[in-house]
Amino acid sequence: MKRLDRLVMTSFLGPMVMTFCIVMFILLMQFLWKYIDDLVGKGLDAFTILELLLYTGATLMPMAFPLAVLLASLMTMGNLGEHNELLAMKAAGISLVRIMRPMIIISVGITIVAFLCANYVVPASALKMDTLIYSVQEQKPELVIRPGIFQNDIQDFSIRVAQRDGKTNLMQDILIYDHSRNIGNVSVTCADSGYITITNDQRYIVVELFSGATYEETRSNDRMDAQEGYPARRVTFQRQKFVKRLEGFGFEKKDEGLFSESYNVLRLDQIWRFQDSLHQRNEEAERELFQRLKDVYVTPWRANADSGRKVDTIDGYALYDAATDEEKVRCLAVAVDRLRETKSRVVSAGDDNYYYNKRRTRYMVEFHRKFTLSIACLLFFLIGAPLGAIVRKGGLGFPMGISVLFFVLYYVISTTTEKFAKQLVWDDVTGMWFSTFVLVPMAVFLIFKAKNDSPLFRSEWYGARIRRLGAALRFKSKGNSDSRK
């Protein structure tokens, strides 16, 4: 490896790793902000949260690669230009393409890695992530006993405590209603004090009571008779302890089969198989509709003696005019019924066709996404590297601003056109590749300007032009004043 290649490669890999980590951190923070309401208050352990972040990070990698490549390439070429290293290389007769060759090789490698991640890593991680998110959303909030409020989230129990000591966790004036028999408030336990604790896995509640009594009505049947009344019993205790299993509070991971056919958890071959199946079902439904529309509905008539006579033509109007009024009314009623039936079939078939096409488009959107995000890595390199050579500004501030600007432009265009494709306004190919087609001319333009050392984005060039214009205006103004004298 030549020194030039080693210099450019090391200058590119460092910012690449740094910017990739920064982008991943930003995307993960955005994910946490989106689902913060579902995660807080569920009593999730650290392992579950780390597992969710791991799967989320793997799912977001194809999104982070393009922005990281754009920022790293712009920083690398900007640093080389700012320290006049790029100028020295060009003065030595080295072309811009030759200077960028190590970066091009790395960018192509990143493009391939991004595609493999999008096709193999993302489907597996997205399935795990969606299952975990759904499991967290379905989990009940962490059980907390608050003073003065009846806690009804525990199955078959309603608990109220008057006071709670924050240091010792001792509760005063405890009231517990037992609704396990589903016949009203027939069993109630009162205690002077006690402890109510919940296990760490949120699966059991442990109740320990002191100096209390249990009041219970004993009923032979579920019918209530206020006149007869019911026998009751009272059991006092100095200390009582029982354990109740909590339903729905412990974290339980749902079945991954619920999301096995989602659009974002499929590989390319699976997506193609699903959309092909939908396409065949749609064609079969269309053939069935056309066959039904071609059916001839014949109203049964009683055969006459001359019904077998050969005729050249049949005049429909003549037949209608020859029919009696009763037959005309019956024919019109049958025709109206047939038209209504045909209209209903056509409308239903149109709705089915729209549904099939929309589902197929969703699959094809994910199909193209795996390619567009991968190609975006190479495309953003072809934008960032020439732009850095033109701007000649290193560091993190200016390249970050330019990179975010281009990425936001790409993201807004791709999101808008993707929505058009999902709504069947555009076809899936145009909707998913339009943003790429927009940025390709920009990349070609920047490469052309960088090869010709264009001062397109240099503030010094614009400053010099403004100063020259100001000097020219002052000279012209001075000449006019001298001529007047």
Image (cartoon, rainbow, N blue to C red):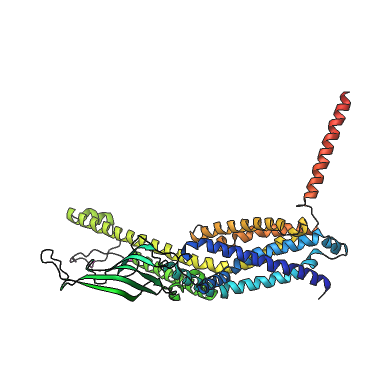
Left/right placement of residue 314 relative to residue 228 reads: right
| Nearer the observer, 349 or 187 | 187
How many tags in the picture?
A: 0
Q: Residue at x 82, y 60 (%)?
A: 83
Q: Quadrant of residue 122?
A: bottom right
Left/right placement of residue 418 relative to residue 390 reads: left
Would you say residue 371 is visible in this rendering?
Answer: no
Of the 4 image quadrants, the one containing the C terminus is top right
| Nearer the observer, 302 or 31 | 31
Q: Quadrant of residue 303?
A: bottom left
Is 297 part of what is drawn in magenta? yes
Pinpoint residue 277: horizontal percent, then vertical percent.
45, 73
Q: Quadrant of residue 60?
A: bottom right
Of the 4 image quadrants, the one containing the N terminus is bottom right
The residue most toward the left is: 227
Magenta stretch bounds? 295-309
Pinpoint residue 159: horizontal percent, then vertical percent.
32, 66
Would you say residue 358 is visible in this rendering?
Answer: yes
Pinpoint residue 361: horizontal percent, then vertical percent.
49, 65
Is 352 part of what is drawn in magenta? no
Left/right placement of residue 339 relative to residue 258 reads: left
Q: Residue at x 33, y 72 (%)?
A: 209
Q: Residue at x 78, y 68 (%)?
A: 8
| Nearer the observer, 53 or 303 | 53
Pinpoint residue 417: horizontal percent, then vertical percent.
55, 58
Above or below residue 30? Residue 156 is below
Magenta span main SS = loop
